[in-house]
Image (cartoon, rainbow, N blue to C red):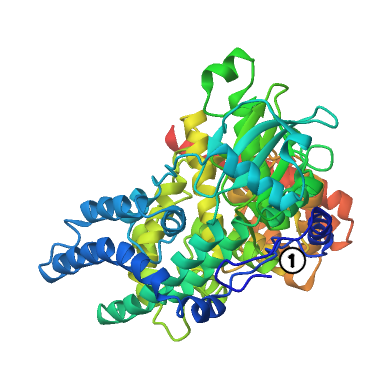
Amino acid sequence: KDNGAGETNTGSSTTTSAAISKATELPSLNVAEPLVPYDPIAAEKILFRQPTKWLVRNVQIAVPFGTWVTGVLIDTIFGKSKQNRRNRAKQLNNIIADLGPAIIKAGQALASRPDLLPSEYLDELQQLQDNVPTFKNEVAFQIVEEELNLKFEEVFELVEPEPIAAASIGQVYKARLLKNGQLVALKIQRPNTEEVVALDLYVLRWWGGVYNKIFELLGRNINLQSVMDDFGNLLYAEIDYVAEAANARRFSELYAQDVAIADVFVPKVYSELTSRKVLTMEWVDGFRLTDSASLEANNLDRKKLVDTLVQCSLRQIMENGFFHADPHAGNLLATKDGRLCYLDFGMMSYAAAKQRNGFLLAVVHIVNRDWSALVKVYQNLGFIPEGTDVQPIENALEDALPDVLNSDISELNFKNVVGKLGDIMYTYPFSLPPFYISIIRCLGVLEGLAIQVDPKSRIISKAYPYVANRVLTDDSQKELREALRRLIFTSDGSIRWSRLESLLDEAKDSSGFDVVPVLDRLIDYAISSEGEELLNEIADQIVKEADSLGRDTLIYFTQAATALSIRDEKSAAKAIQSLVHAVQNNKDETNEKDVG
């Protein structure tokens, strides 16, 4: 058990296997909980009685941060805040990089918080990298022996004498299992990681209370202690390799090639050789997606790999809600047979159905430029406090966001769109929950990687077919029905024929798209009490377009209206499909005549 300050006892490998199995058998798709959860209150009670531990660390953290804060305050007093913001952001980045793994992780987490920091700081903190030396092999192997209760040399044989990778939390060896000759990746946690993390979180949380008061004086209502608690929960999950193993197994069950998505591979976990500080997984040979020379030499299609990555990520976020929140180049490999391999399952997240559908509905409102409805979605998701005057926010959204409909979808950059949203979220009283932060981080990292592989790649462009498919074919949830209604029908009930045509055209590029369910949804809507406006619209179109439409198009209109009136769904589906194309063709012909 953990006492809240990093003092734990480790169970046997049998206990570990049971814990992994239990985590993956749970009916919920939520992220696996660490065996020892973060408990800030318990940690405070223990560490407060150990001043020799936290006083020195307090000074190490407080002095550089205090210098930075003083500079920011001086800039504010003399009206140079915006002018010097980029330099202050670089200064903060350098400070964080020198303060150890927990602080670096905190900085990386802040890089996804547009509600807390302006865009200049977000840009700088996104460049934070782990830059830590390896620790001695003897120390690493001793940890393995203590954690797994075995002799290292009786189970493992090193293939490479030194670690092949090292990060702030642990380092990885390439080894062979003596019992069967299988190659494995052996990840071993740094000594005293949990103690260091617990101490730094305690100090950061204490200073969070101090800075809360400072922010109040600056007119910002930010609860940094709550932010630190969210971060603490994420970090404790990341340093628990039993939780990571459970997440890897769950991810494989949901998304690997043999059960779900073609060309997606997840390495096997050796649960009997895994503990909270040791993780043993199948070794995978492959190439980073950014290694263009190796990909080309092995005839691997970079664009196909990126498409697989994007489609898999969208399915994770929008269908199941259980998703890999950190798909950067170091956590992905292209195997020699062309599959996409996911690695490192320490940073996972989960969005409930209401949350992910709210996110999708927000996208729909941005497409429609319906800022009032967008703000309501943000309120329903808890982003904006009750009682907030939202009119200034609606005005800011109108001024800041691009006209998605009149922009070339291939030119829309996710980072730019999120950056403009982030400026608004920083200016106004937004408070972003962990699930939204994880989605933004995931999609931002995804686009950054996609652009490295293919400079013309745009996550919004690649996501749009999937979004169109999802909105058009999923009738199971209220939010998605609302999304379809708002996309296809105007506020007065008229049909946006060109929008429907565009959605069908985009959706057909998404894997698994079938037009029949789409038309079925339109038919169901039309023959419902709500769909009376659709029938009236068709009738109005017949009257309005009678002079300009050709004979075939009039026939399609008549067939659609007749089929709908007698609830002949099959005929109605065919008629509406033809009708959509007919109306669009007529508009194109009219436009050509006007131009001529």
Residue at 49%, 78% (x, y): give it: 44
Is residue 524 left or right of 198 when viewed as pictured?
Answer: right
Is residue 239 left or right of 386 when viewed as pictured?
Answer: right
Figure check: 458 above or below 76 = above
Between residues 203 and 585, which one lies in front from this camera angle?
A: 203
Residue at 54%, 80% (x, y): give it: 41
Q: Which residue, as the protein is rendered here, is positioned at the far bottom?
A: 387
Tell me where residue 222 appears, x and y as whole percent.
39, 76
Is residue 147 left or right of 123 when viewed as pictured?
Answer: right
Q: Which residue, as the protein is rendered here, is positioned at the far top?
A: 297
Residue designated by label 1: 477
Q: Residues within 10 Å of mark 1 (few under 14, many from 20)?
A: few
> Could you tell me if residue 396 is visible in this image?
no
Figure check: 496 above or below 377 = above
Between residues 573 and 301, which one lies in front from this camera angle?
A: 301
Tell me where residue 85 appears, x and y as whole percent.
22, 57
Q: Quadrant of residue 54?
A: bottom left
Is residue 516 left or right of 397 when viewed as pictured?
Answer: right
Amino acid type for the residue under numbered disc 1 = Gln
Dot 1 falls on a residue whose secondary structure is loop
Residue at 70%, 24% (x, y): give it: 338
Tell me where residue 363 appears, x and y as whole percent.
54, 58
